[in-house]
């Protein structure tokens, strides 16, 4: 029996090829492939046309992955991750901050295999849910936040991520401030840290925040630094922070606010450990 399909809210890329690579009546090539970035994993989803075009000829999908050279946009040698009858698959046990390429093919009941779907690249990153941060006026010792606080070895370790600190510290990425009306604000602190609203409407989930936005700079194709001014924290909205990794490369963090009161806020966060990589979540 085929599995149920979960709702998908991903950007889809149209396929450009329907060539078959094996003799016999191979299924159609999976027309699209999308991904959601997870912690130590990537969730893949694709169009189900290989099955729906001819259900009696369809047997399963094959999922492949390989290394990805982000700087040169090159995928390595493909290896089989697994098979599935549903148009979705989670590739687990991946290293955070290490880019990967993914593709999918379809196999018929006679063993004929289609060509591969469009290729997707994605990079796992750490995240956390339901983190409480207080305004500095309420709890000064728990009003600051830093995405990654390196111990000096240049390696991203779990204990260095998502650290709650004092709001008066000078080495935090931001602290939460409260104005005279009771509204709460993210206030960037350390040099190289800026913040931008991801979208002007609420986002459904942390996974709705995708690539870090490029703010148009003075020259064509140039990205300007993110603002260092305070930005209001509003429930349901997504925010992207750019931070200085201390090695000459920017690293990006994402925040989605789930609750805002007068005395505390609750947020979900994600951080891309791969230096200079703007991929945050959904691709």
Image (cartoon, grey):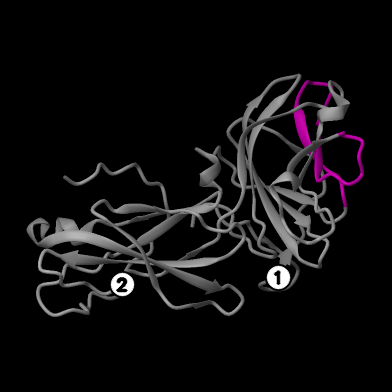
Q: Position of residue 60 (x, y in %)?
A: 21, 59
Residue nearest the viewer, comparing 118 with 86: 86
Q: Is residue 162 visible?
A: yes
Give the numbered dot on residue 277: none
Residue nearest the viewer, comparing 205 with 216: 205
Above or below, 77 against 83 in this view is below
Instruction: Determine if the magenta segment contains residue 271.
Output: no
Mark 1, residue position: 222
In the rendered view, does 15 fall on the left or right side of 159? Answer: left
In the rendered view, does 36 fall on the left or right side of 61? Answer: right
Above or below, 47 against 102 in this view is above
Mark 2, residue position: 116
Which segment is the magenta one?
Answer: 166-190
Determine the residue positioned at 20% across, 62% down.
50
The picture quadrant where one finds residue 46 is bottom left
Q: Is residue 136 visible?
A: no
Determine the residue positioned at 15% across, 72% down.
112
């Amino acid at each position: 029996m085929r599995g149920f399909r979960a709702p998908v809210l991903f950007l889809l890329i149209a396929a450009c090829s329907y060539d078959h690579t094996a003799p016999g009546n191979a299924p159609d090539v999976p027309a699209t492939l999308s991904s959601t970035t997870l912690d130590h994993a990537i969730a893949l989803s694709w169009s189900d046309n290989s099955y729906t075009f001819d259900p009696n000829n369809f047997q399963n999908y094959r999922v492949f992955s390989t290394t990805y050279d982000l700087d040169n946009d090159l995928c390595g040698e493909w290896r089989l991750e697994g098979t599935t009858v549903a148009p979705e698959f989670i590739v687990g046990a991946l290293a955070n901050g290490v880019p990967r390429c993914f593709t999918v093919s379809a196999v018929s009941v006679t063993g004929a295999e289609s060509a591969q779907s469009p290729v997707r690249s994605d990079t796992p990153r750490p995240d956390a849910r339901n983190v409480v941060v207080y305004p500095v006026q309420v709890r000064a010792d728990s009003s600051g936040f830093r995405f990654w606080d390196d111990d000096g070895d240049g390696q991203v370790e779990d204990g260095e991520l998502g650290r709650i600190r004092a709001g008066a510290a000078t080495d935090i990425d931001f602290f939460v401030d409260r104005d005279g009306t009771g509204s709460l604000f993210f206030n960037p602190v350390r040099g190289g840290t800026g913040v931008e609203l991801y979208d002007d409407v609420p986002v459904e989930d942390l996974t709705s925040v995708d690539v870090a936005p490029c703010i148009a700079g003075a020259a064509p194709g140039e990205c300007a630094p993110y603002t260092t001014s305070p930005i209001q924290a509003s429930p349901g909205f997504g925010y992207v922070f750019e931070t200085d990794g201390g090695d000459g490369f920017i690293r990006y963090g994402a925040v989605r606010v789930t609750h805002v009161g007068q005395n505390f806020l609750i947020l979900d966060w994600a951080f891309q450990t791969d230096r200079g990589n703007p991929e945050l979540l959904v691709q």
